[in-house]
Amino acid sequence: MRALLRSLALAALMALSTVVLAQAIDPLPFKDHAEEVRFQKLTRELRCLVCQNENLADSNADLARDLRREVFQLMQSGKSDAEIKQYLVDRYSDFVLYDPPVQGSTLLLWFGPLAILLAGAAVVVTTIRKRNRNDAGPAANDEGDDW
């Protein structure tokens, strides 16, 4: 019985280690710590195009891995952060930026939530005012019975 439990525990441990290794991010050969910090900062400013709610640094999607390698190669070729971002924007549009610029095509993205909030507040205020006007008017045919 102990041998069976040991073999099951060993099999579970091996399966778990395989999953963990499959999820690991490929290590990249940085020149120094400053370059690694720059890479991490840059990949946190870029959106994973598959996950959409994650940045490139945190995503495990295959496309995110490819984009991280591409960002690394662009860094190695001497491109600045702005040039790397512009290269990715040219290929994938402003959607690749986690903080897209305010321009005509992104106005709804930036100000849409505020507009919805203000419209909701206007509806609530209007409804309350209408109710107050209806309650303040004379009660027609009020005999005191609530039946």
Image: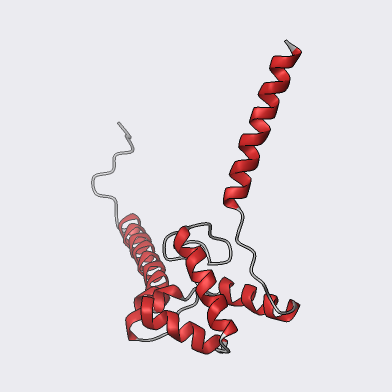
Is 2 displayed left or right of 133 in the figure?
Answer: right
- Residue 20 visible, this angle: yes
Q: How is the image coloured?
A: secondary structure
Residue drawn at x 56%, y 86% is 77
Residue drawn at x 58%, y 61% is 58
* Along the line of sight, the residue nearer the viewer: 130 or 73: 73
Residue 141 quadrant? top left
Residue 119 quadrant? bottom left
Q: Quadrant of the C terminus?
A: top left
Q: Residue furthest left?
A: 141
Q: Residue furthest top?
A: 1
* Along the line of sight, the residue nearer the viewer: 98 or 15: 15
Q: Quadrant of the N terminus?
A: top right
Across and down, in percent, residue 92 comes to 37, 75
* Along the line of sight, the residue nearer the viewer: 113 or 125: 113
Residue drawn at x 53%, y 76% is 71
Is 52 displayed left or right of 76 in the figure?
Answer: left
Residue drawn at x 58%, y 89% is 78
Across and down, in percent, residue 128 comes to 37, 60
Across and down, in percent, residue 104 comes to 33, 85
Across and down, in percent, residue 32 comes to 74, 79
